[in-house]
Image (tube, rainbow, N blue to C red):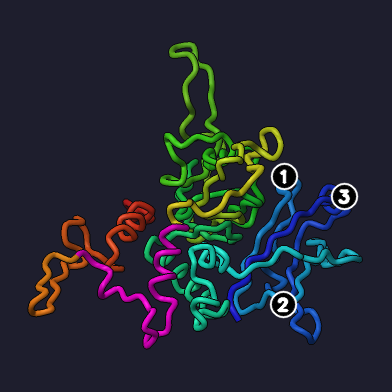
Amino acid sequence: MSTIALSWTVANRATLIAAGYDLQRIEYDSGSGFSAIITSDDLMPLVAHVETYVYHHSGGDTSDDYQVVFVKSSDGTEYGTPQAITSKTAEGIIAVSDIRDEGYTEALYPALTDAVVQNGIDLATRYIEKRTRQWFSPRYRKLRFDGPAADRLQLQHPVIAVLKIEVEDSDQDLTEIAVYNRHLTQGLTDPDDRYNPMLWYDPEWYLTDETGYERDIYGPADFTWGGQNVEVYGIFGWTELGLAEQAQELAANSQVPASYGSAPEIIQWACKRLTIAHMFPMDDPDGQSLSTNRHVTQRKTRDQSITLDRPDAGVGYESFTADEAVDAILAEFQQQIAFEVV
């Protein structure tokens, strides 16, 4: 069992929302009937401006059946027909086929079954995400923040799409809040919002006789001061569009990208490199070892000795994988540490 990435599109969401069905409950069936994955108090919002939804189910299996049930928040009434979720894959920055394409076929390496390779991918993915403190695939999350008493809310993870925002249990008008996901909606990478993810109430402007238009920095709306009183329902992750994809909004002024993107190619390359280095059994002679994945600084053929450099020699930072190329990539994508002044 592993984490399963689910994705589905709600084409009739306008009809559902008009009838009062504004929540989604994800269920799975491994053979004994459907069971809810998330509790009734934490259902996923269904909103008109978002077409595609994602969810990661830990402890699932791609052979399980999945469905989404539409629910009314007002009285808990369920829509008559659940929608089947057919897009389900094992979670990972890369797929088993990516490793096979590198020449590591089961015919050449009998020990490398699909299960063994997938386990190597899972380990590499978890390590990369833990090391960088980033997600490299679209993830649905309900995140709670301390209200800063300001019109700007700093986020930890790059934002892909926002479904709902509550401040002090009160729904906020998303048309009044700027979502900083312009790398997906506008193709803007300078500045790159992924390095500074945030939400910002549209600035208020007023006219004065003395100075003309000025920004009202204390505007009528802000993220009220408090402890974990701001809840953001959204889809987050460090992704980028493919070469054939165009940055654009799903609908004009929706601030929702037409495509959520995928893991950067350089991160996929690093994941393949780590997977290949660690997917073999430890006692397999074909296995790769990080202890030898270093530069040779001296050889003595007569005495048959080899001197290797230190894993972090010359790279300017501490090495964690003993692979200089991978370490440099992960360092570039590390989440910035946030500081708060009180």
Q: How far across and how far down the image is residue 214, in percent?
A: 47, 21
The answer to whether residue 339 is seen in the rendering is no
The answer to whether residue 238 is seen in the rendering is yes
Q: Is residue 330 left or right of residue 223?
A: left
Mark 2, Cα crowd under 10 Å, few <14 / some 14-19 / many 20+, is few
In the picture as drawn, the residue positioned furthest to the top comes out as: 209
Q: How far across and how far down the image is residue 164, in percent?
A: 65, 52
Q: Mark 1 points at which residue?
A: 49
Which sits in the foreground, 269 or 110? 110
Q: Name the residue under label 3.
A: 15
Q: Which residue is drawn at 54% across and 49% down?
A: 159
- Tell me the element at label 1: loop
Q: Name the residue under label 2.
A: 63
Q: Is residue 244 left or right of residue 311?
A: right
Q: In this view, does 79 lie to the left or right of 288?
A: right
Position of 98 relative to 170 (above/below)? below
- Closer to the observer: label 3 or label 2? 2
Tell me the kind of residue under disc 3: Thr
Q: How far across and how far down the image is residue 88, in percent?
A: 69, 67
Tell me the kind of residue under disc 2: Ser
Position of 241 relative to 128 (above/below)? above
| Residue range corresponding to the magenta coloring | 268-295
- Tell me the element at label 2: loop
- Tell me the element at label 3: helix
Position of 323 relative to 118 (above/below)? above
Q: Which residue is drawn at 58% across and 49% down?
A: 261
N-term-proximal mark, 3 vs 1:
3
Mark 3, Cα crowd under 10 Å, few <14 / some 14-19 / many 20+, is few
Which sits in the foreground, 123 or 22? 123
Quadrant in which the N terminus appears? bottom right
Q: How far across and how far down the image is residue 69, in percent?
A: 81, 66
Pointer 3 with pointer 1, Cβ within 8 A? no
